[in-house]
Amino acid sequence: MIGSIPLDAPDLEDRIAPALEAVETRLMEVVSRADEAINPPTSHLAAAGGKRLRPALTLLTAQLGDPELATGEGVRDAGVAVELTHIATLYHDDVMDDAPLRRGAPSAQTVWGNSAAILTGDVLVARASQLVAALGPEPVLAHARTFERLCTGQLHETLPRPAGTDPVAHYIQVLADKTGSLIAVSARYGAMLTGAGARTEQIVESFGEKIGVAFQLADDVIDLCSDSQTTGKTPGTDLREGVDTMPVLLLRQALAAGNLDAAGQSILSTISSEDLSDDTVLSQVVARLREHPVVACTREMAFAWAQDAVDALKGLEEAVAAGTSSRLDAAGVTDPLARQRALDEAATRVAVVRKGMEYFARLLVDRAA
């Protein structure tokens, strides 16, 4: 078991599990390295837990490259950096959503206020940037581009949608930017920092982005179908903040096409005319949405995107073999037996990693089943 990913490969798990523990230790060090005034807010969400899926994915894809680098300091620090960046976005999201809970604990802004929560997120981004800066120019550029996409995705969700834009396609792009991009770079870092090859990087990055969209679509279902004790978040938070997630967008799409049923029309009427800051009104709307077919449709979309992510792994074996050959060439390894042994070992690892990535895809969407 690597984090939440059972690989059914004891040797590989024995390699990765200690590295993930080291990531956790390093993460807690990084969020607690200031003083008694700053440490409580900066460590608040990290200490509250989390699946650590992003660093787990970094460590998993690192197995596709040089085994000597796969659990080294560079890969581990990349795992810490992506988790720090993720946690930083949660501080900012909770301020924007005015969410009272995160991971079952009071959200930072309810404890320290909006300004402190925003600054805490900024501090964590700065600390993630420092870690990435030590990894070299290419990881720095990847991190910068990812953070830009995180922000532009959030802006596109917050600002009015451009006229003439398809609302569902627009929303999918928002998900790709604000969720998929960070999962994508998490996967890419593992391949990048172990010399797995440019094609391998492209494949795992595409996998990460698609599974990020699937993950968020699953979250849209969970936001309506789970309670706060299960998710650590208040059901219907996006509704309350006026953010149309996929189920609501599908209602609006059906309305525009003239085929929305009476139940859906009633839900949209309530959303537009009632005060969703009232807990009773919100819970009633959430309960009605749970029973509408748009939730099942959103669930099906999540599973379809997860399958697209798995399909994106096509050619992974060939890409890893090519990357292995390139590393052997660069190292001057010419002995046929040594080269074949290295290629055979790489083939064994890629089979296990593919299995782990396929499970990773199922894991992220099965929560909405």
Image: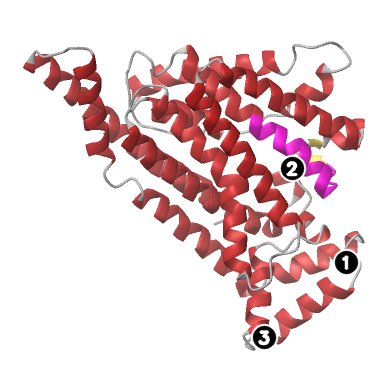
211 to 57, vertically: above or below = below
Q: CA distance from mark 1 to mark 2?
A: 20 Å
Amino acid type shown at disc 1: Val
Q: Is residue 3 left or right of residue 285?
A: left
* Residue nearer the viewer, 75 or 11: 75
Is residue 32 shown in magenta? no
Residue 261: percent from the left, percent from the top? 67, 85
Lower position in the chain sequence, tag 2 or tag 3: 2
For the point 43% across and 21% down, the residue is 16
Residue with the mark numbered 2: 232
Amino acid type shown at disc 3: Asp
Which element is circle 1 on? Answer: helix
Residue 46 showing in the rendered view: no
Residue with the mark numbered 3: 261
Q: How many marks?
A: 3
Amino acid type shown at disc 2: Gly
Q: Is residue 92 left or right of residue 221?
A: right
Residue with the mark numbered 1: 281
Lower position in the chain sequence, tag 1 or tag 2: 2
Residue 68: percent from the left, percent from the top? 34, 13
Which element is circle 2 on? Answer: loop
